[in-house]
Amino acid sequence: MSQPDTAALPIQFSDTAAQKVKTLIEEEENPNLKLRVYVTGGGCSGFQYGFTFDEAVNEGDTTIEKESVTLVIDPMSLQYLIGGIVDYTEGLEGSRFFVNNPNATTTCGCGASFSV
């Protein structure tokens, strides 16, 4: 079985983020959960990222699987995330999922909001 060409995916899902999602899903004891990434208006830079667990995949959603977990992105959010990388970090500032987004022209200090 061949691996999918990750360069062809519209957005990347890091190993670190996939492992954290897998751990959180195991803790919730619900294998149907998926990590939904979305973009909303707001934040200090115009748009902000959101992350939530969801069981549903809606019509038009993009799904990316890695490490037996699924990342889900709605079509409106995907246009702002193409070429980005969903990642996870733990540090002095706490732990969080984040998006390394090459489309963002400005970001706020915490990295939660951006503009294009």
Image (spheres, grey):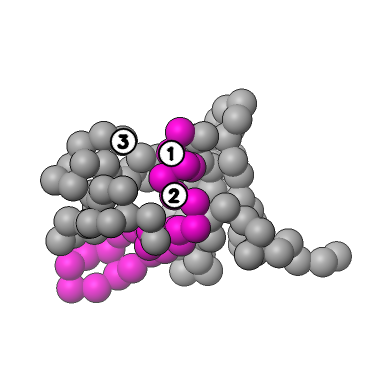
Q: Which residues are magenta?
A: 76-101
Picture quarter with the N terminus: bottom right
Amino acid type shown at disc 1: Ser
The local crowd at label 1, few if under 14, some if 14 to 19, many if 20 or more residues have their Cα within 10 Å, is some
The residue that disc 2 covers is 81
Q: Quadrant of residue 2?
A: bottom right
The label number, if any, that marks residue 27 in the structure image: none
The local crowd at label 2, few if under 14, some if 14 to 19, many if 20 or more residues have their Cα within 10 Å, is many
Residue 36 seen by the camera? no
The mark nearer the N terminus, 3 or 2, is 3
The residue nearer to you, when weighing 98 against 28, is 98
The residue nearer to you, when weighing 27 against 87, is 87
x and y percentages locating residue 77 in the rendered image: 43, 39
Amino acid type shown at disc 3: Thr
Residue 95 higher or lower than 79, as above or below? below
Amino acid type shown at disc 2: Leu
Residue at 60%, 44% in the rendered image = 63
Residue at 60%, 30% in the rendered image = 60
Q: Is residue 97 inside the magenta stretch?
A: yes
Residue at 32%, 55% in the rendered image = 104
What is the spatial separation of the Cα atoms under label 1 and label 3, in whole angstroms?
Answer: 8 Å
x and y percentages locating residue 70 in the rendered image: 58, 49
Q: Is residue 67 inside the magenta stretch?
A: no
The residue that disc 1 covers is 77
> Are the two marked residues, 2 and 1, in contact with CB atoms closer than 8 angstroms?
yes
Q: Seen in the image, is 15 located left or right of residue 38?
A: right
Residue 1 seen by the camera? yes
Q: Seen in the image, is 102 located left or right of residue 10?
A: left
The residue that disc 3 covers is 40
Q: Quadrant of residue 6?
A: bottom right
x and y percentages locating residue 50 in the rendered image: 33, 43
Residue 102 higher or lower than 62, as above or below? below
